[in-house]
Amino acid sequence: MPKITIEEFQEIARRSLTFMDSMGIHLEHIGTGEVTARARYDESFLRPGGTVSGPIMMGLADAAMYALVMSLIGPVELAVTTNLNINFLRKPLPGDIIATAKILKLGSRLAIGEVYIYSEGDEEQAPVAHATVTYSIPPRSL
């Protein structure tokens, strides 16, 4: 069972992660060690060539990983990104983008996960981007 609900995460996002709202990001699923998040399409997210911009995909990957970490350790708001590496694999369709995040390793101080990003409605169902993300977990109070 996850240690945080979608509603609890959305409350943290509303209060402390206002970028998520401006990027149209919301959670669709949160499980123990797995998260699905979506960035709702907005024409302002397009860059020349009609593709969803990299910063939107990176923001989605980071938000999905933050929720993933909290699904495992609870609402530890001071967990922070220490590394995000993203590979843009192909041009996303103009539309919603969906991220699926899974944990690779959870330690006492670091969490490492991977995020696949897809275009909604893509018949090939092949990822448009892949990210690996590392989060630093603050020491637990004694």
Image (cartoon, grey):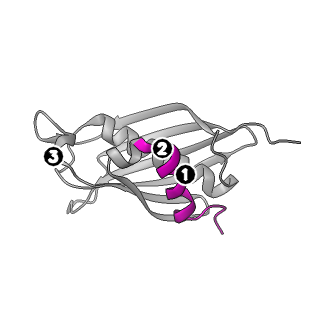
Q: How far apart are marks 1 and 2 (CA)?
A: 7 Å
Of 25 and 30, which appears nearest the observer? Answer: 25
Residue 12 marker: 1
Cβ atoms at labels 1 and 2 below 8 Å apart? yes
Q: Residue furthest front?
A: 15
Q: Main secondary structure of the magenta part?
A: helix
- At mark 1, the secondary structure is helix
Q: What stretch is highlighted in magenta?
A: 1-18
Q: Does the magenta stretch include residue 50?
A: no
Asked where in the image residue 50 lies, by quadrant, the reply is top left
| Lower position in the chain sequence, tag 3 or tag 2 | 2
Residue 30 pos. (x, y %): 53, 63
Residue 17 marker: 2
Residue 43 marker: 3
Q: Which amino acid does label 1 sit on?
A: Ile
Of 5 and 47, which appears nearest the observer? Answer: 5
Residue pictured at 37% horizontal, 49% vertical: 21
Residue 118 pos. (x, y %): 31, 53
| Lower position in the chain sequence, tag 1 or tag 3 | 1
Q: What residue type is labelled 3?
A: Glu
Mark 1 or 3: the one toward you: 1
